[in-house]
Amino acid sequence: MKDSYPPCAAFHKNVAFFYLKAGFSFLFSNLYIQNAVK
């Protein structure tokens, strides 16, 4: 099962990873901006 992934599953995994990274960078930039404004 591990070596026979359907391509759509790998695509969804990549998209989820991309959104996770984008969310984390957005969160950190938000915290940084809030601290800088204070």
Image (cartoon, rainbow, N blue to C red):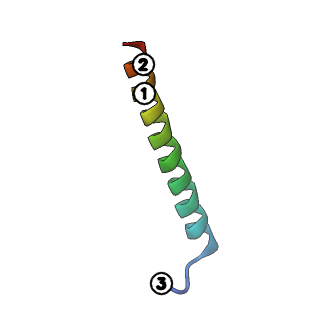
Residues marked 2 and 1 touching at CB (< 8 Å) = yes
Please, what is the three-letter code of the amino acid marked with disc 1? Tyr
Which residue bears the numbered disc 2? 36
Of callouts 3 and 2, the N-terminal one: 3
Which residue bears the numbered disc 1? 32
Which residue bears the numbered disc 3? 2
So how many labels did they put on this image? 3
Please, what is the three-letter code of the amino acid marked with disc 3? Lys
Going by the image, does 38 lie left or right of 15? left
Residue 14 x/y as whole percent: 57, 61
Of callouts 1 and 3, the N-terminal one: 3
Q: Which mark is residue 4?
A: none
**Label 3 residue SS:** loop
Residue 3 x/y as whole percent: 53, 86
* Distance of label 2 from label 1 (alpha carbons): 6 Å
**Label 1 residue SS:** helix
Q: Is residue 1 positioned above or below 11 on the image?
A: below
Q: Residue at x 47, y 31 (%)?
A: 29
